Each structure stands twice: as C-alpha cells, then as structure tokens.
Amino acid sequence: MYSLIAITLLIVVVIMMAVKVVPQQNAYIAERLGKYNGILQPGINFIIPFFDRIAYKHSLKEQAYDIHEQICITRDNVQVRVDGVIFLQVVDPQKASYGINDYVFAVTQLAQTTMRSEIGKIDLDKTFVERMVINLAVVAAIDEAAIGWGVKVLRYEIKNITPPATVLQAMEKQMQAEREKRSVILESEGKKQFAINVAQGERERVVLESEAQMQQQKNKAEGEANAIRAVAEATADSIRLVAESIQSKGGMQAVQLKVAENYIEQFGKMAKASNTMILPSNLADVSGIIATAMSVIKQENTK
C-alpha cells in the first residue's frame, strides 16, 4: 500500500519535472548533462528529468536600468555629476547566457565609462544643450560591444547633470547678466523704434499739411477763376441782352430815357454832396446832351 503511494508520488514528481511552462515573452535555456541543449519557447515544453535542467531564464521584454551617478570632468576641467537610465532588450538568449557572466552589469559599467569619455570631449556650457548627441554616442558605443552579449541597447537618456555649487552660482550670475543685457537691448530698441515712429509721424504730418495747403490754394484759385469767369459771362450776357434790346422796336427811346434819367440823377447827387458845382455851358439843353450820347451809341452799333 505504502509502496504504491510512493510510486504514485514519484510519477507525479517526474511528470512535474518533465513539463515546463514558459510564459510569454520569456526564454529558458535548457542544459543536458551540463551542456547547452536548446531554448524553450513560450508554452508547454518537455525535458528529460534528472538529465535536463533549466540553466538560465531570460525576459525578452524591454528593460530599463539605472546608471548610478558618477563624477565626470568636462573639457574645460569642471567636475559634474551625471546619472542616467539605459534601456535594453535580450535578442539572443543563448549569447546572453554564455557570452558574458552578467550582461546588465557589463552594460551599465560600459555606459558609465562611455559617458565619462563623451563628457570629457565638450565644455560645460554645451553639456546641457547637447544631451541628445551624448545619448546617441553612448548608445552607439555600447551597442557595438553588446552584440556579442545577445542584448540590444535601445536608447540611453541622461537624467541629471549637476555641476558644483560654485559653478552653479557663476552660471546663475552669468544668466542674470545675460537677462539684464537683453533687457537693456530691448529697451534701447524700443526707444529707437519710438523715435523712428515719431519722426515718421512728423514727416507724414508735414507732408499731409503741405498737400492740404496746396489743395486749399488750388481750390481757392479754381474758385476765384470760376467766379471771374462767371462774372465775365454774366457781364457779357447783360451787354448782349442790352444790345439786343436796343436793336428791337422802341429800344432807342428806352436808351434815351435811361441816359436822361442817369444824367439828372448824377447831377442831383453832385448837388447834395457839395455846395460848389462845375456845370457845363449847355446844361439847359438836355436834349442836346441826350442827342450827343445817342449819336455815340449809334456809331458803336454801326461798327
């Protein structure tokens, strides 16, 4: 009875040892009698108990590892503390198992040494603006060496670059000086632009005023010319009408009457304006004066 139970338990143990379930995105390295035998793929796999064993287990997912802070010296001899993070992925489980003892340790150490080398090539001021260049250089250097380790370096990112406190204070003063310089430049540019705008506005005002005055004088001259033309045309029209009236029936009699009225009216005004008058010798002969004036009119009409 007890022997049956023992045999059953032994069979169950052997079956459990023979069946290996590999999770997705994982790879197990199987060895037979201490020698590499193959890679167990995700799913159910069978091995020979007591002869085969799982020597290494690798995750095929992308993995991130911290690069511990280290002191680097820039090209201008300034010590800075730099740390970062590196992203790896196992692409060949066999090489990752037998190509190197610990690929994570090897990659992180190589990342630190490469980082020191890259930082030493540039000045402190450029380390903050050339992070992408440094990251790509580190990835290229590590990836070349990691090919034989069965891992792929996907990317590397610098997390922090920390200069000494004295350097930070000097950089802060430099930044403040640069800000003050830009402020002074902007203020001077503003004053310059203001002066330019004022000058341009004054010039445009003078031009507009001169154009307005010129237009005003032109309009005034045109108005005066139109007025003179209108007066001349009216005078010509009145003279033409008078001439036409004289030529009509009864025109001469009307002219004689008008001349006589103006003659008498003017002598009346002269008598009121002054006590002394110079009278023509033939003042009593009004008809003679009218006849003389009419003879002049007739002569003008016959020309």
Image (cartoon, grey):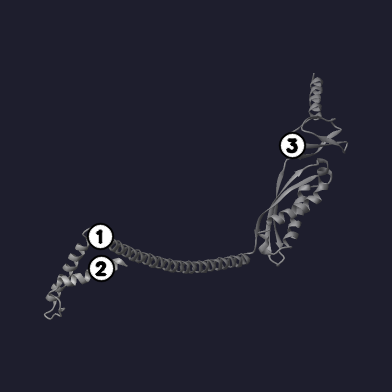
Q: Which residue is mark 2?
A: 297
Spot occupied by residue 152 in the image (x, y as percentages of width and height): 77, 46
Q: Is residue 104 above or below residue 123?
A: above
Type of amino acid at the residue the image marks with label 1: Ser
Near-viewer residue (119 or 181): 181
Position of the N terminus, as image quadrant, is: top right
As drawn, the residue found furthest toward the top would be 1
Q: Which residue is mark 1?
A: 245
Q: Using a 10 Å C-alpha cutoff, classify the residue at mark 3 as few (fewer than 14 neighbours), some (14 to 19) or many (20 or more).
A: few
Q: Nearer the viewer, mark 2 or mark 3?
A: 2
Q: Using residue 82 as the reference point, say whether residue 98 is left or right of it.
A: right
Position of the C terminus, as image quadrant, is: bottom left
Type of amino acid at the residue the image marks with label 2: Ile
Residue drawn at 22 percent across, 61 percent down: 251
Real-space Cα separation, disc 2 to disc 1, in angstroms = 13 Å
Type of amino acid at the residue the image marks with label 3: Gln
Question: Where residue 25 is drawn, which disc sits there?
Answer: 3
Quarter residue 83 falls in: bottom right
Residue 62 appears in the figure: yes
Of mark 2 and mark 1, the one earlier in the sequence is 1
